[in-house]
Amino acid sequence: MEAGLWWLALSWLGYFFIHSLLASLKVKYLVARKWPGFMPWYRLFFNLVATVLLVVPLGMTWLLGGETVLAWKGIWWWVGNGLSLAALAGFLYSLRHYDGSEFLGLRQLREREQRVEDQERFRISPLHCHVRHPWYFLALILIWTRDMTAPMLLSSVMMTLYFIIGSLLEERKLLAYYGDAYAQYRERVPGLCPLPWKRLDRAQARELEQQGNRE
């Protein structure tokens, strides 16, 4: 593998390490104990760091360039771009079911929230009835429906691996927050790829939501 690709892989690993470290409960509890006044800023700080640091591996991917090694051609070009548009539509639709202020960290800052735990209630949106991590699923569609140079292919593989590992790390926190309700949800709905035979209807989703918000 060329030296540039090694550096690209290392930049992704560095990003994943910092992202996972800052998202961990251990670091959050440490900050809450040592610098409680910073906690209302923590989510906003986390999002800013994650966005700024992402520029490094993405910028390297673009700068390394290279010839196309995988391409969607003919009818498959239409299939790939159709899937991309569907993924973008799914992402825009999903925003209706997220608390944007909570996600960005603005609510925590406005309310001077110092607790470590996420404050959102346990909610199962229509997309969450089919897959536990709909944003990861939609992102994977967007990633793998593009033509690939060698750097893009490497970045796509690295991001896919991190979505798998990151989803498992994230679910450890969700189990701590929502207990048996999330454990049941995890058993009944697939993680990253929807399966027609594993899904919840709205009545089942509401039942689990009520259970999770009581615990």
Image (cartoon, rainbow, N blue to C red):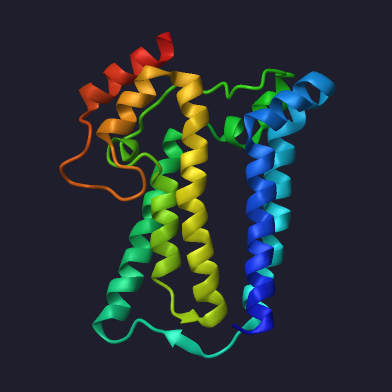
Q: Position of residue 173 (x, y in %)?
A: 52, 29
Q: Is residue 115 left or right of residue 214?
A: right
Q: Position of residue 40 (x, y in %)?
A: 74, 25
Q: Residue at x 27, y 17 (%)?
A: 207
> Which quadrant of the structure image shows residue 104?
top right
For the C terminus, the image quarter is top left
Among all residues in the image, which is located at the extreme top?
Answer: 214
Between 85 and 151, the one nearer to me in the picture:
151
Left or right of 79? Residue 115 is right
Specify the farthest residue to the bottom: 67
Quarter-of-image position of residue 209: top left
Q: Residue at x 45, y 25 (%)?
A: 175
Q: Is residue 68 above or below residue 111?
A: below
Do we see residue 153 in this rendering? yes
The percent position of residue 15, horizontal first and vertical second, equals 67, 55
Residue appearing at x 28%, y 25% in the figure: 205
Q: Give the residue displayed 66% in from the left and 22% down from the top.
A: 116
